[in-house]
Amino acid sequence: AELDTLDILVLGVILLGTLAYFTKGTLWAKEKDPYASPAYLNGNASKAGKTRNFVDKMDESGKNCIIFYGSQTGTAEDYASRLAKEGKSRFGLETMVADLEEYDFDGLDALPSDKIAFFILATYGEGEPTDNAVEFYEFIKGDDVAFSQGGEDAPLENLNYVAFGLGNNTYEHYNSMVRDVDKLLTKYGGHRIGDAGEGDDGAGTMEEDFLAWKEPMWAALASHMGLEEREAVYEPVFGIVDREGLTPQSSEVYLGEPNKMHLESASKGPFNAHNPYIAPIAESYELFKVKDRNCIHLEVDISGSTLSYTTGDHIAIWPTNAGDEVDRFLRVTGLADKRDQVISVKALEPTAKVPFPTPTTFDAIVRYHLEIGAPVSRQFVSTLAAFAPTEEIKAEMTKLGNDKDYFHDKTSSQLLNIARLLEYVSNGETWDKIPFSAFIEGLNKLQPRYYSISSSSHVQPKKISVTAVVESSMVMGRKDPFRGVATNYLLALKQKQNGDADPSPFGLTYELHGPRNKYDGIHVPVHVRHSNFKLPSDPAKPIIMIGPGTGVAPFRGFIQERAQQAREGINVGRTVLFFGCRKSTEDFMYESEFEEYKKALGDKFELVTAFSRESSQKVYVQHRLKERSAEISDLLSQKAFFYVCGDAANMAREVNTVLTQIISEGRGVSETKAEEIVKNMRAANQYQEDVW
Ligand code: FAD
């Protein structure tokens, strides 16, 4: 019966599609209700005209469960969709997923008590909300928060909610978003169902933390709402419609263009996380002097755009998947022959959003829009088991899905992506029974990668430098090394720019010319993200920078800026950089540039190096910092700004510890007191981190 309903829906969609085709969409242009119009006519439904009242929207669409997400890199969004899916298939909840940015929250008190709201909230950087959660957070923590019905004591007494946070324990404000929001909702009378879960990226246990949290949460929710669990049957959220009559050459077909504007003309601003600028790369070169590791310097030209940046900001690079991985994915899913077939994707229920514009092709979806390289979730493996080519393979998938340790040994320790996992489990046999919808639901959108801008906006306002180390790691038991998505793409671009006719780093090929050759002449899609990682406004203030490896990126920008200021006759304060790498002869990036800056800055600039592989004992930046205790103490007493950039997992934490020791010894105060001083430095922005 399930299939019959789907068939009818798909048939309906085909009919609508044909109608739309013959009327060139004029019928739908008049459509008032934006989410009732077929998504494939205009890409994602435009934001304009949508209601911001989620209670109304739930009523209109017959939902009793709304799952809000605050997501920066897509994981929280992915968890939200998975919860929505599971809530529906296992418990019959009428779920919808909602981007926090798209709704107002003064109506939180209007959600009736027989409905439920989920908050899946990532914490970003120094305890900050994700970009899409800023407004929500400002609202809920406001001193004068006012809900629509104006109840005074416990305005949210009808609100039942569920909460899960995504954080990183290496940061000071671990999971502060979910903790704060949970406290505030409770304070206003809301009732949390189950525990407020916390996933820890720092410990590398995010996925398992999520899986472990959700089972007791579902039990608590089922008991609270009187839900009966039933056997979960997979129901596709998206229907795939063949668009016969269209070819990849048809002008309305998206071949990887991120949105309608890009399809119709050269890209127009504003450029942001929804709309990249296709930027020319002015120059690119290798920074390392060894064969087996690469670090790329890029100059991205933004002069033809409205983009701007200030020193210390981040640039986002929108990558393309490697051709070999695209081929592998299409081969193992049985789609290789259909890769250029034009299809539309239609949300089969009103609140679901197609995450890329259509009509498009399977090739374009897999190459430009889906994160096919990422780690695979165990839950997704369980979902796919039902579509295994044989009973034996199904049993193996089910085992992998259920057994955490087995899953780790067999697949995640091998850094397998989805296609490699399927290939491995089926021994190469094709998985052609998986509905394509399952991939749209189960894989993330291909995410832009962020890079700390390594140039100064004072020196080169229209050119953004990027310093990216190429991700590549040998994996025990695997023939080929693991290759990172964005950085190998950048390496290919660099090779092409430097005269390689057929660039294929490590045998990986890329469609560098982009959809409809729009990236030809070496272009890359980018946008800029402003950050709080900033030089002191007074150039005379001393600064101490800790930046090993690519952590040096923003500091190259800082020093470039101060060198220029010194040349202009401005009084520049002491500028000390702690840089570390393996060997002075291998990966000491920007060595000769630092010599140039030294000429401009003289004694104001000092570069302290730590080479970890040049002596029997490994020396790291934190050791050098310790050796300079007296000088650091002295600079701090002159109100020096202290900056750390790079590895969040170990380095940043150890630097924090060393700094605490320096303060404790230098000022003769207890460790506890020194910790408090460091905390205060952070709060006053005198201690700033840009870590990942
Ligand atoms: P990805 O393919 O994203 O892989 C990255 C890692 O994810 C892998 O090493 C692995 O640990 C894991 N992983 C991926 N796929 C799998 C799998 N299938 N199974 C298991 N594990 C997997 N980097 C720089 O080089 N320079 C910078 O200046 C810089 N600045 C940054 C600033 C910010 C604010 C942030 C958030 C990050 C910054 N980064 C920087 C890191 C950068 O954004 C990228 O994460 C990095 O370049 C790797 O990207 P990638 O696409 O090549 O690798």
Image: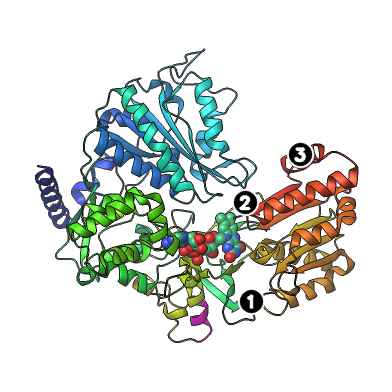
Instruction: Name the image quarter holding residue 582.
Output: bottom right
Front position in the image: 62 or 568: 62
Residue at image location 35% in from the left, 32% down from the top: 218
Residue 15 placement, left or right of 77: left
Q: In this rendered view, identify the residue nearer to me: 105 or 457.
A: 105
Looking at the rendered structure, the kind of residue marked 1 is Leu
Magenta stretch: dominant secondary structure:
helix
Q: Is 230 on the left or on the right of 611, as rendered?
A: left
Classify the position of the C terminus by image quarter.
bottom right
The three-letter code of the residue at mark 2 reads: Ser
| Vertical placement of residue 68 versus 257, above or below | above
Q: How many C-alpha atoms fall within 10 Å of the one at disc 2: few (<14), some, or many (≥20)?
A: some
Q: To which residue does mark 2 refer? A: 531
Which residue is at a point 60% across and 47% down the rendered structure image? 125
Residue 287 got which mark? 1
Quadrant placement of the N terminus: top left
Cα–Cα span, label 2 and label 1: 25 Å
- Tell me where residue 594 appears, x and y as whole percent: 77, 72
Report the front residue among 11 and 264: 11
Q: Which residues are magenta?
A: 494-499
The residue labelled by disc 3 is 680
Question: Within 8 Å of ligand 1, the CB of disc 2?
Answer: yes
Q: Are marks 1 and 3 in contact (CB under 8 Å)?
A: no
Nearest to N terminus: mark 2 or mark 1: 1
Mark positioned earlier in the residue sequence (1 or 3):
1
Q: Is residue 86 visible?
A: yes
Q: Which mark is residue 16?
A: none
